[in-house]
Image (spheres, rainbow, N blue to C red):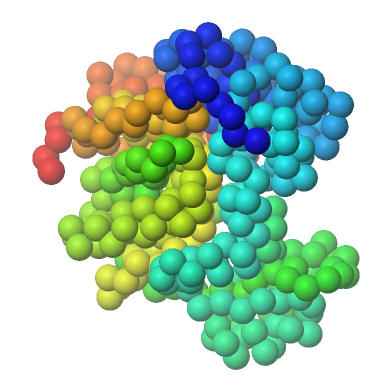
Amino acid sequence: MDLLPHPLPPGATIGILGNGQLGRMLAQAAARLGYRTHVYGPDKDSPAEQVASASTVAAYEDNGALVGFAAAVDAVTFEFENVPVKSVRELSARVPVRPGPKILEIAQDRIKEKQFFASIGAGTPTWAIVSQRNDLESALKTTGAPAVLKTARLGYDGKGQAKMKTAGDADAAWAAITGGKTPTGDGYAVLEAFVDFRCEISVIVARTKDGQVVCFEPAENDHANHILSTSVVPARIDPATSKAAVGIAVRAAEALELVGLLAVEMFVTQTGEVLCNEMAPRPHNSGHWTMDAGGVDQFEQLVRAVAGLPLLTPVRHADVTMINLIGDDVNQLERYLKDESARVHLYGKKEARPGRKMGHVNLLRARRS
C-alpha cells in the first residue's frame, strides 16, 4: 500500500520503526520540516522516545500494537533494519512503508545481499555459503585463509562473526557463531575472504518515489572492536575511486527502487578496487558528519524522501572528522564542549556501558578540497 499524498502535508505523522539514537535524530529532522513522529520499539525511555511526538513501546512481533501504530501514522520508515520482515509486511498492507519490506529482506540476509551486489555488477570479497559445520573445509577452498565466518542474518557491530586464521579454527569459529546449537536449513552463514584493503568507505544515497537520486560523498571509516570509531570527510581516495563508489550506491538505489535512504559500506583494496561489504536501508553512523558539515543532513534527506519532498544536493562547507563516543568515551565530553571546532550530539542515554554508543562529535576544519 503506497497511496501517500504527494507531498505529505505539514502536521502529518511519520512512524519510525526502532526507537534508538537514529530515530531520535530522525524525529528531530522531521520536526524541523513540520512533521510529527511516532516511534515504535521495545525499549522504554529510549533516545527516540524522549523527543518524538508519540511512542509505542512493544515487541516488533506484537500484531495488535502494530495495527494501532499503523492507524496512528501517515507513513512509516525505519532506523533499525533488524525488524521482522513479517511485521513490516503487516504494516505495509495498512500504511505506506518507505523503504519497503523487499529491501529490508535483502539487507537482513548476507547471502541475498551479496547476490544483489553481483546483480548490479558490484564486486564483493570472495565468499561461500556455509549451512553446517561440515561445509567449512570446502568453503575455505573457495575463500582461502584467513577468512571470517558470519551469520547470514542478524549480525551487526561485529556480532555473529568469528575469524578463521586456518582450517584448524573451524570448530571454534562454528561454536562462536552458533552458540553451540545445531542450525537447521540452508544458508546459516557465509565465509568471507579477508580483504587487503587500503581503507573502508561508505556512501549514503537518497531516492524519492519519482526517481530523484542524490548522494553524499564517500566517508572514510575506521573501526575499533568492530564498531565505527571515526569517519573522515573528505575521504583520502582519488576522484576515480570516489566516482566508482558513488556509482555503485546509485545503481543499488535504482535497482531496489528505493524510496528512502541507503548506506553502502565498501572496501578500497590496495590496487584501488572497490568491493561492497554490506548495506543498510536507513540512516547510518558514518553519515553523522552531514549534520554539521554537509548542508542538508542524512536525516532530513530521509524525511524528504519519505514525505515526497524534493531532495537537496549536499554542499559540504567544512572538512570534518566524526568521532563516536562509545562507552567511557563520554567521559571526554568536557574537552569537546570547550572546543570551538566541535559539535556535540548526545543521545540521552543515562548509563555508559562498553560498546554502547552514547553520542558523537563532529570536529570541523576549514574546507581544503
Q: In percent of the image, x 69 and y 63: which residue is there?
A: 151
x, y percent for residue 99: 56, 41
Picture layout, residue 39 above or below residue 210? above
- The answer to whether 151 appears left or right of 261 in the picture is right
Picture layout, residue 145 above or below residue 270? below
Q: How many numbered badges does the structure rendering display?
A: 0
Let me know if residue 198 appears in the view. Answer: yes
Query: Considering depth in this image, is 141 or 332 the residue closer to the camera?
Result: 141
Location of residue 137 (image quadrant): bottom right
Q: In percent of the image, x 59 and y 16: which residue is there?
A: 13
Picture layout, residue 164 above or below residue 281? below
x, y percent for residue 155: 66, 54
- The answer to whether 69 appears left or right of 48 in the picture is right
Let me know if residue 303 appears in the view. Answer: no
Q: Farthest residue in the left direction?
A: 368
Location of residue 272 (image quadrant): bottom left
x, y percent for residue 20: 62, 29
Which image quarter is the C terminus in?
top left
Q: In percent of the image, x 67 and y 12: which residue is there?
A: 54
Q: In percent of the image, x 18 and y 58: which residue is there?
A: 239
Picture layout, residue 78 above or below residue 268? above
Which image quarter is the N terminus in?
top right
- The answer to whether 169 appears left or right of 362 in the picture is right
- The answer to whether 40 appears left or right of 263 in the picture is right
x, y percent for residue 132: 79, 77
